Amino acid sequence: DNFSYANEVYPGDPRFVGITTTDRLGEDGYNSAADDSDGDSLDDLDYTSTFGGTSSAAPVVSGVVALMLEANPNLTWRDVQHILVESAEMTDPSHIDWTNNAAGYDVNHYYGFGAVDAGAAVALAESWETVLPEVALSSETVNVFQTIPDNSQTGVTSTVTLPVGISSLEWVEVTLDADHTSVGDLEVVLISPAGIESELATVHFDPGINGYANWVFTSARNWGESAAGTWTLEVRDLGSDDVGTFNSWQINTYG
């Protein structure tokens, strides 16, 4: 999603009118009228359909985490992440982006692991055993220094091989250094040894001229997979006129 560390959030999705408000009393709430004025099939009573994104997801998931910690105060932050992943409910199952990764987890660039299921998460927390201490495995910096073909699907591809060390991944970080006079033209895709793709950056409006200067991207799409093997990073320039160079990258894995 093009923002440094922006993916390091608990997986979840508010879904259609799933986030409500109770801080204003009466039928109006945040809505301008109590009739069906917004075109959906629900009466406009005591909720808002315009409060979304991380502004709504963060407090809702925080409340679920509080319930989990009430059920089991010994949970670590990594335990919490594991429980949310294991108990998530698939959202919009017909969505084309759902992918079953090599560890058997369903992941989606739009929905993560799915919607948070409070009841399932608390039930799992009650009997949860603390995960083993975290292990980190990193590559050396891979120097590339290649010009990225302008307005082309060809791009520049670079690989690095990680040894055996993490049998069950949690997070993957990619530090990318790339010069470009219009960074929004770039598409960045990480491919795991198992062939699972993570779209770290897609083409978007961003006239920034500084490129990705040691920019850190994160992905949880390889959750549960092995880190061992060859990782591939593809950088493509899908816009015209502006040009740039793929300088270097490094991968850090945690599990």
Image (spheres, rainbow, N blue to C red):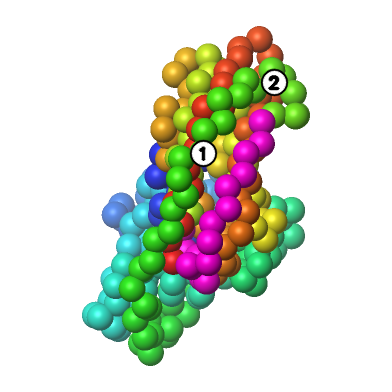
Q: Is residue 66 above or below residue 3?
A: below
Residue 179 screen position, x and y as percent: 50, 21
Residue found 66% across the figure and 67% down from its top: 102
Based on the displayed image, in which of its 4 quarters is residue 65 positioned?
bottom left
Residue found 52% across the figure and 33% down from its top: 143
Residue 188 screen position, x and y as percent: 60, 36
Give the extent of the magenta segment.
156-171
Viewer-nearest residue: 70 or 104? 104
Residue found 61% across the figure and 12% down from its top: 242
Residue 4 screen position, x and y as percent: 41, 39
Q: Is residue 181 left or right of residue 130?
A: right
Farthest top residue?
241
Can you tell which of label 1 and label 2 is closer to the viewer?
1
Q: Does the magenta-highlighted stretch encompass residue 44? A: no
Three-letter amino acid code of the residue under disc 2: Pro
Q: Does the magenta-highlighted stretch encompass residue 157? A: yes
| Residue 155 numbered tag | none
Q: Earlier in the sequence, mark 1 or mark 2?
A: 1
Residue 197 screen position, x and y as percent: 65, 51
Viewer-nearest residue: 128 or 142? 142
On the question of residue 248 being in view, the answer is yes
On the question of residue 13 being in view, the answer is no
Based on the displayed image, in which of its 4 quarters is residue 61 positioned?
bottom left
Q: Is residue 1 above or below residue 144?
A: below
Answer few, some or many: residues within 10 Å of disc 1's Cα (few below 14, many 20 plus, some between 14 and 19): some
Q: Where is mark 1, residue-wise?
A: 142
Viewer-nearest residue: 117 or 174? 174
Q: Where is mark 2, residue-wise?
A: 149
Q: Is residue 50 above or below residue 138?
A: above
